[in-house]
Image (tube, rainbow, N blue to C red):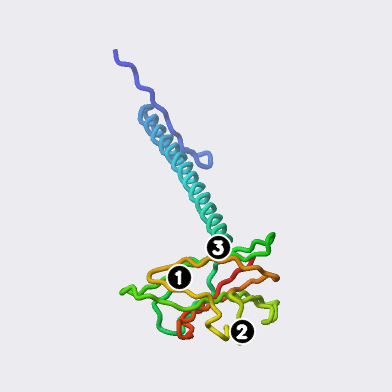
Amino acid sequence: MHKRQKKYTIIIIQDERLLRSFKLPLYPLKICASVIMGLVILSFVAFLIYNKISESDNEELVTRIENQNKQAEAQDNGKEISSLAANPSNLSLEDFQSRFDETQKLFRYSFLLKNKDSKNTTASGYIFVILKSEGLAPEQWLSYPHAILVNGIPQNFRDGDPFSITKHKTIAKDISMQYVYDALSIFVFSHDGKIILENKFSVKN
């Protein structure tokens, strides 16, 4: 004996007038309801996944920005303002780093002087480091090694720190200081007194 299938009657009424009525079996209604429910659940799950991915991307972006800010703060003392090669030269100045040791009244700096000559020809000359600040008069600027400055440039190039390199050399010094400085210039003279490099850095504390 077959069980009688249940049916539902749908009646559409407008302004108390019967417009239309029709009967639907229960099984198709269940299928439709299941499909709609499944689509709702899938949409909700997709929404949650999208929000999770967005939050993760936002956190990663915030972390990346914070790390960049920290790196920028850490490297602020070594920020190069300008670089000038006054004469053709195979020398370059790289990896400049600096910091103030206020407890010992010292300014510490280091950089890599590179000779890019393909034939490894020895390069020699003299190096000056000039510390300056907008709030200080030129006579209060600090020159290492000590030198008389004319328009901010050492007058006697032979007073500089001598160097001779074939490939590269790390230059690292500690300078005693009396004032607070916010800018630095590095002059590299050739052995015959020509300025072959002039690099300017911000050394704000």
**Mark 1 touching mark 3, by CB under 8 A?**
no
| Dot 2 amino acid type | Leu
**Mark 3 touching mark 2, by CB under 8 A?**
no
Image vertical order of residue 191 relative to residue 13, above or below: below
x, y percent for residue 47: 47, 43
Disc assigned to residue 75 = 3
x, y percent for residue 200: 54, 75
Q: Dot 3: few (<14), some (14–19), or many (≥20) neighbours within 10 Å?
A: some
On the rendered image, what quadrant is the C terminus found in? bottom right
- Quickly name the residue at label 1: 113
Q: Dot 1: few (<14), some (14–19), or many (≥20) neighbours within 10 Å?
A: many
Gap in angstroms between the C-alphas marked 1 and 3: 19 Å
Gap in angstroms between the C-alphas marked 2 and 1: 23 Å
Q: Nearer the viewer, residue 103 or 58?
A: 103
Q: Dot 2: few (<14), some (14–19), or many (≥20) neighbours within 10 Å?
A: some
Q: Nearer the viewer, residue 5 or 39?
A: 39
Image vertical order of residue 28 relative to residue 175, above or below: above
Find residue 106 and report its image quarter: bottom right
x, y percent for residue 52: 49, 44
Image vertical order of residue 35 relative to residue 88, above or below: above
Q: Which of marks 3 and 1 precedes in the sequence?
A: 3
Secondary structure beneath label 1: strand
- Quickly name the residue at label 2: 149
| Dot 1 amino acid type | Leu
Gap in angstroms between the C-alphas marked 3 and 2: 28 Å
Find residue 160 and report its image quarter: bottom right
Secondary structure beneath label 3: helix
Which label lies toward us, 1 or 3? 1
**Quick check: 17 left or right of 26?**
right
Find residue 70 and report its image quarter: bottom right
